[in-house]
Amino acid sequence: MLETGVILFVSFGYMGLLFFIAHYGDKRADAGRSIISNPYIYALSLAVYCTAWTFYGSVGLAVRSGLGFLTIYIGPTLMALLGWMVWQKIIRISKVHRITSIADFIASRYGKSTTLGGIVTIIAVIGIIPYIALQLKAISTGFFLINQYPEITVSFHYSEIPIIGDTAFYIALLLAIFAILFGTRHLDATERHEGLVAAIALESIVKLAATLTVGIFVTYFIHNGFGDLFQKVAEYADAKNSLGGDSGSVSSVIFDKYLLIKGQGNSYTDWSIYLLISMLAIVFLPRQFQVAVVENVNEEHLNKAIWLFPLYLLAINIFVLPVAFSGVLRFPDGSIDADTFVLTLPMAERQQLIALFVYLGGMSAATGMVIVETIALSTMICNDLVMPVLLRLPIESMGLRQDYSGLLLTIRRCSIVLVLLLGYAYFRTIGEFYALVSIGLMSFALVAQFAPAMLGGIFWKGGTRSGAICGLIAGFAVWMYTLFLPSLVQAGIISQDFVNQGPFSIELLKPFQLFGLQHFNRISHSVFWSMLANIGFYIGVSIFSRPRAIDHTQAALFVDVFRYSGEAAESHFWRGTAYLPDLKSLLIRILGKRRTDAALSEYADKRKLSWNYLVTADADLVSYAERLLAGAIGSASARVMVSSVVKEESLGIEEVLNILDETRQVIAYSRELEKATAELQKANQRLQDLDRLKDEFISTVTHELRTPLTSVRSLAEILHTNPSIDADQHKNFTEIIIKESERLTRLINQVLDYEKIESAQMDWIITSNDMKEIIQDAIASTRQLVEDKNITIKYELSDHPPLISGDRDRLVQVMVNLISNAVKFCDADRGEITIRLTSSDNRVQVDVQDNGIGIRAEDQGKIFEKFQQVKDPARGRPFGTGIGLTISKRIIDFHHGKIWVNSTPGKGSTFSFSLPTTLESALTR
Amino acid sequence: MTPKARKNKRLVGLFLLGCVLFNCPLLALFNLKTMIFGVPLLFLYIFTSWTLLILLAAIATKTSSRPSSKPDDQTGP
């Protein structure tokens, strides 16, 4: 059954299926009914991580070094747990800035630097070409092995196979066609390829199914489950041991060899470093960036992928050790390369169908990786390597060209072919000497170099362009020295002495023991030194270099991506304007007319603009256009192109400072507004209080007016209706009527006075006065009041106070007010009022002290205010209008004096006022 | 705390747990020449803790993702 024809038919048939699925996926996407927009397809597409290295190489690694192969899958599991922190942020940033590759991401983060984009691209290409070679090698080996069925070839050399007869070559060509067809169909601002993702998901299913099939077959059909297999291996090891003369130790060889993390050197460190680089690889491998970030349809898909993807990894690894053991048992002489056990075991058992399925699984693992990786690399090469160079060519050669999109697609297609051919060439010349895993690990170690610039870029605003450049170059240089150059030694290109004695026989510089560092394996050793150099330079140079304005901008936009709304944010920092037709023709040249019109009308719809009136594109539109271009040609190139049509190149440090300044002004202005608002609110509150007080005042006054009026009226009525009333009573009644009328008059006068003072219509009659006389007058006119309540009054009046000038009647009024006030608040019979008159050099002071209820401290300031009456909850509304003190204060104020109160609640109050003695000049003026 | 932030916190916790489970001191404890149920101890340990971690991650993302099914633009990790 397994003739060459059948195998070829199945191989190319499988490729045909991929083409069909991809075509179907694209068609559905064009129709708007995506088949890949669900978390399961997303998780499966992430599994492009598992390549031929996983499929064939894991078993090989398990045979060579035990359980260490698992680190490559546990690392991504751990990283997946950080998915929301790392991946989601990268996805969000990439969507906002239309980033389509890892080179673009780093370039864009560090000020849209074309240099940086170029460096990352070169590093990625150098790191990934061997990895692609590895896949081609696996395809080639697989075909070669199965083609020999039923014979299992012990060894073969690729150099013996002519290129014309090598299936891998044709598969490579097919893959190039596939990648060109489905990876570069058109230039798109989002650069998503739905058909491609659908095909990758299918490949992931096939390779998992194949691994599980061979695993179950080996474990449960050749042997009786895990326990039986481990038992057999232990017995086999014992037998081998006793042959070698070392009897006794139960299966310790198998434990030492395959199951334990071995004690030689520093293998726990190796383990941890493998974990680390695989953690980084799952995010920073170009193909992982492509499927996880660029092809991501919805961030929410991460939710399920976080555990589905690790589950996939677990499933694909569970049978690796059984297959490895089974292979060791089946081919005890070690003649068969352990990398091929997955395929050679079913072949040895004469299971043609399983063998064929495994062969297909291996091919799916390899092709999936190659397709995505070449597309990712071609985008990088085109956008970050070729375009920047083309854009710097003299304008004449480029200016004539009306349509860039064709050129861009051509560049990409050429890069795909170039990358695949380079991969194939590497496999034919060097790849032969290496096991699958060591090639893959070399790539991982190099890809890990992107981590400081990437992770630093999204979490640390301090990282600068020069820091990133230095870090990347340093890490890359160390990697070249410690891994890449020695690999050339292995292929015989460089002399063996380079590894054994170090360059120029300098021991310290031996590439596998740099500076004498031992006990690390080659990969860990290289990772340690290169990461040290990379992180050291990245942080060190970043700290000591001066960031440019655009570095600041991009750093803020990336690190705080969740804070900025995205669309509007960038234009805030970018103040160029452009002539709209220029901008439009630029867009048409890159994206084509249809897509440009669609994008612009979408923009207009969102902002409710009409193109008819627009001649100049504002900063917002310019940055929108730049983002559109960035999706197609990378952010660095887009910046170059846009700046060719933008009028004012902006973003000098001054502009940024201006923006900052404006922001500061806006903040200051809004603070002032807040303050003004607060003041207004306060004033409003005060007005409301006053209004309330006025109402109360009116009700008080009317109440005060009504009481005497009522008594006058009722007494008058009595007198009127009872003419026969006796004389004594008659006299008594009329006295009350007179007194009440006087009180009424006084009250009305008070109100009138108050009104006059308030409206400044008071006529002041200024004369020279003796304060002592004024006090005596006041006492005389309040005698009745005092005697009614049986209150004692004491005087402490200095004999010859200086004269003061002022309105005598008004001053008497003040004194009367104060005394009647004191009387009001004193208890009848026990009350005691002391009036004191003192004088200093140029002032006289009068104190009226009582032993009444006193005034609470918080009320003392208020009692002189308009309409204010102190209320005592215990006594209720006090007697009087509360207008007296206000009038007194006005009068004293007029005389340039001062009035105040000292009081202790419960003990009494002292009202005092003081007047200047030399008033003539002030008052007559 | 938003459901998203809570979920993120849980997952970071799981990440730290994973780092501890799959690194030296704990790993060394199980690096013994012992068989449990006919399966080597270290093999069993690694696959059990791996499964456990995936299970916990599935629970962590499931329980807290329900309240906010639409993409949330305000909160981030």
Image: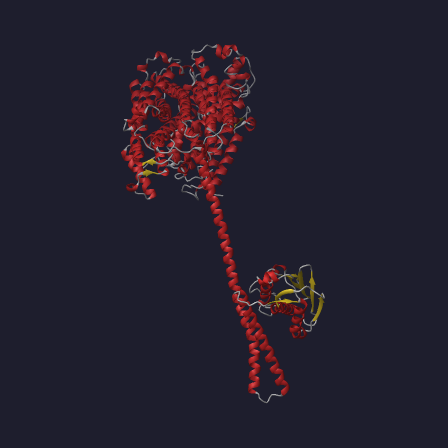
- The image shows residue A773 at horizontal and vertical percentages of 67, 69
Depth check: give the residue in front, A140 or A911.
A911
Q: Nearer the viewer, residue A318 or A725?
A: A725
* Labels in figure, total: 0
- Whether residue A14 can be seen here: no
Quarter of the image where the N terminus of chain A is located? top left
Q: Is residue B64 left or right of residue A808?
A: left
Q: Nearer the viewer, residue A898 or A617?
A: A898
- The answer to whether residue A589 is above or below residue A739 is above
Percent position of residue B2, x then y: 47, 43
Where is residue A800 shown, x and y percent of the image?
71, 65
Tell me where residue A775 sits by quadrant: bottom right
Q: Quadrant of the C terminus of chain A?
A: bottom right
Q: Quadrant of residue A246?
A: top right
Residue A537 visible? The answer is: yes
Q: How is the image coloured?
A: secondary structure
Specify the quadrant of the image occupied by residue A610.
Answer: top left
Q: Is residue A703 positioned above or below A363 on the image?
A: below
Of A253 and A139, nearer the camera is A139
Give the vertical position of A32 relative to A257 (above or below): below
Q: Is residue A392 left or right of residue A320?
A: left
Q: x and y percent of residue A772 in the render? A: 68, 68
